[in-house]
Image: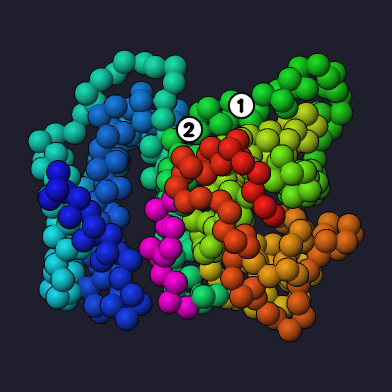
Amino acid sequence: MKKLVETHQKIRAELEAPAALRNFGSGWWSGALGIILAVAALGGILCVWFPSYFSIRELAKLHQTGWYRPALLVVIILAFLFSLLSLLLRPTKTLGMTAMFLSLLGLTICGNGLAPLTTEATPFYFGLDFFLLRLLLTGLVFIPFENLFPTRSGQGIFRYEWREDLFYFFVSSMLVQLLTWLSLMPANTLLAVTQWSSFRAWVAALPFLVQVFAIMLLTDFVQYWVHRTFHRVPFLWRFHSVHHSAQCMDWMAGARMHFLEILILRGTTVIPMIILGFSPAAVNTYLLIVYLYATFVHANLGFRFGFLEKFLVTPRFHHWHHGIEKEAIDVNFAVHFPWYDKLFGTQHLPEDNRWPEGYGISGNPVPSGYWKQFLHPFRRKPNK
């Protein structure tokens, strides 16, 4: 056990190495990428072994396709090659050896044949494959841009509190079935007691792009007021303060949300798109857009978007919502369109292109750690 703890500490220290020790060519990137790919492959193997337990129904069918297992093998081989490169380039061998061990483990499992260990059907499941897909896709999209055009240079992927935000990312993905069911319950209840068949048929017949834009307008309006209420009502702020406790902003920071806040926010914002009768294709497209957009506005991206900042929420706009300065308190509640903040008097976007000096809550009243933060709203009233 002591050896495992020491190894964990060495791996963590290497992943959180100072910027000077993780430059391109230092072996850090190849070692970190090797570990990430190897862990993802091992997770993919678990999904094949126990599809009823670790796969969401929409993705479970992919495991039976002819390309899934070859794709897993390619990922494992890439992880192994990256581990070799890290061992060659980096004086400290911790990352390279860890990536090599994990990739060889995955290679051994795949070499012995990969088939489901159980076909037992279960009514409940965890979204492990959903977590891996989210992590890899958003990571591949945002990490390169965050390193090329950062708001905070030198912040790195494994920045302060990255493990907490990754765990939030993990929990929301693994419990996707429960979260979806609970979030849709209010909208489905209203749907069952309203008789708007003609109106819903008219809405569903609208052009696809018109539907998507209308959903964005309606949900952003609802989200604006729900979000603003979370800031103004002390009891609700106890939950929302967990989200604002993040002291670093990047593509993972948006995942830090209290479980009950997720239910309230999602449960209210999905109501317009469900009860008004928008087509499933438009709804699913919006869900993809809002997921990517929420990741985008939290990202560590220092782009200057110019005139677009007047029409769309950008990272700088939302970063001011998270800013620790006094001028950043209770501003910029919209997710898509800054018009709502301008209309209702809560917009704040300095014309000199300034960014906040820091993020979080003054005095850091929210404790560290997922479970402490989960219990935090029930234990004491945090100061805003």
Q: Position of residue 293 (x, y in %)?
A: 62, 56
Q: Is residue 28 above or below residue 196?
A: below
State the count of labels: 2
Q: Residues within 10 Å of mark 1 (few under 14, many from 20)?
A: some
Q: Nearer the viewer, residue 143 or 76?
A: 143
Locate residue 106: give its quadrant. Answer: top left
User: Label 2's element?
Assistant: loop
Q: Secondary structure at mark 1?
A: helix
Residue at the spot x=72%, y=25% of the render? 186
Residue type at mark 2?
A: Leu
Say which residue label 2 marks: 175
Q: Which class describes the residues within 10 Å of circle 2: few (<14), some (14-19), or many (20+)?
A: some
Magenta stretch containing residue 123, yes or no?
no
Q: Is residue 159 left or right of residue 367?
A: left
Q: Position of residue 312 (x, y in %)?
A: 73, 64
Residue 231's disc is none
Q: Magenta segment range?
A: 153-164
Q: What residue is rendered at 23% in x and 57% in y?
A: 9
Quadrant in the picture for residue 128: top left
Q: Nearer the viewer, residue 118 or 315?
A: 315
Point out the image quarter for the N terminus: top left
In the visual, does 194 lie left or right of 281? right
Residue 76 in sight: no
Q: Position of residue 193 (x, y in %)?
A: 81, 16
| Residue type beneath disc 1 | Leu
Look at mark 1 in the image and give the residue it sits on: 182
Residue 160 belongs to the span the image colors magenta:
yes
